[in-house]
Image (cartoon, coloured by chain):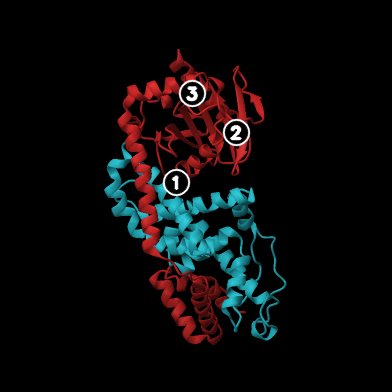
Amino acid sequence: MFGTPHLRREEFDRAALVHVPELLRVASRLCGSADAGEDLLQETYLQAWRSFHRFEAGTNCRAWLYKILLFTYSAQNRKRARQPFLVDLDAAGETALLVDAPTPDTLTAEAVKAAFDRLPEYFRALVLLVDVEGLTYREAAEALDVPVGTVMSRLSRARGQLRLQLAQHAPESSTGARSGMDVSAQGRARS
Amino acid sequence: MNPDCQHMREMMDSYLSEELSVETNHGVLRHLAACRDCAAELKRRQRLRALLSETLDVAVDVDRARARITHAVDREQRSWQRAGRLGAVAATLIAAVAAAYWMGRPVDAAAYDDSAGDHVACALTYPESTAYDPNRAAQNLAPPFEHIVEAIGQSRGAYHVIDAHMCPYKGRNYAHVVIRGDRQTLSLFAERAERGALPDAPTTVLAGDTLDVHATTRSGYRISAVATRDHRLFLVSERPTDPPDLAQDILRSAVRFIRGLEK
């Protein structure tokens, strides 16, 4: 009810502000800079505060904040790109690899960053949440508002695409030879 | 690659994320002890994760970010408290003065963007399992909108109301009804018309009614807006397409409810 939320300010500070360090790191990584990450996080917390009257004490505040962070991030991107995040999501969901590319022997930070940047936005967020930040599959599912099975299948595709990107841009001697796989022969037909 | 190794590669990342059952974990360890290729691939994937974490690292200032957030929330809280102190009578007077002032009706340029923004910030954060609780809605709605859910109906075909409350978004004060159905989430917003006219948008006529519907797309969301004498209604659809007939029925019922308030 209007006017009620400010009564919960202490509860908001106690439940939500404790997650600032972790969410700031994720926001900055998503945006690629600390300044943009701070802007995103401030908007996320303002929106969380405006919706805090709906937050149920005792439920997972961290996952709730992640959910708002990701929606805020995707809404900002939609404004810039004039394109719905959900379209990206669906397109990404349909992209699958018939060949599971092996990870190259020789990995450099530059190559890993370039491969990560080439992933679709939705896949980047998934890999960041689970493989970098260490969220469980269930927590990622709550943050993205999808079933756990969907997280697992999309994460598998995201990781496969990341390895494929690395293999395609790695020196020839560093990948593929031992497994006999032709990493250039990727398939994208399976739905 | 033999089927065991193929199966191992499929489970390898879940193993690294510690998401496997104890039994499956033991199976992985047994295979890794016997298979040098898979053990080597596991090390490469561990190295890939470490490099990802390292290369995506950004130096952040947590104290500064926390101070910015606290300041922004303080400012918003103060604006709510000021609005609350005005009280219902003062708010009515202000509305009357504003209505007089806006006889020439300035345009509320943020009308559509704010509706889409509140839809994202509020409606889309509801868990999938949320079910309508009339007591919660009664507690969180405020006059004159406390009967808006009964007016539009809790269920209409595939669409079901999952919650209703007042939403203090960016200084607005919407009655917000969250509706789910047909694999999408809809928001119905109702507010007093105190911010000026709706911006121009392609206009269509709402079937079975005499009101014009301003229909536009913002941030990928379809927004159908109707202005009555003293109020405005927005129906935000999760998909950038026209709402189907049932969604238009919801909007039509809401218009009738609002007109009833204005008699």
The answer to the question of whether label 3 and label 1 lie on touching residues, with beta carbons closer than 8 A, is: no
Chain B as rendered: colour: red
Residue B71 vs A33, above or below: the answer is above
Amino acid at pointer 1: Thr
Disc 3 marks which residue? B231
Q: Is residue B80 visible?
A: yes
Where is residue A102 drawn, in percent x and y?
61, 77
The image quarter containing residue B237 is: top right
Would you say A112 lies left or right of B194 here?
right
Would you say B95 lies left or right of B199 here?
left
Q: Is residue A1 visible?
A: no
Q: Nearer the viewer, mark 3 or mark 1?
A: 3
User: Which of the labelled discs sits on residue A95, or is there none?
Assistant: none
Residue A29 vs B98, above or below: the answer is below
C-alpha distance separating marks 3 and 1 = 26 Å
Amino acid at pointer 3: His
Where is residue B73 drawn, in percent x and y?
37, 48
Disc 1 marks which residue? B125
Amino acid at pointer 2: Pro
Question: Does label 2 or label 1 sit earlier along the sequence?
Answer: 1
Look at 45% across and 39% down and name the residue there.
Answer: B170
Look at 44% across and 39% down and name the residue there.
Answer: B169
Disc 2 marks which residue? B243
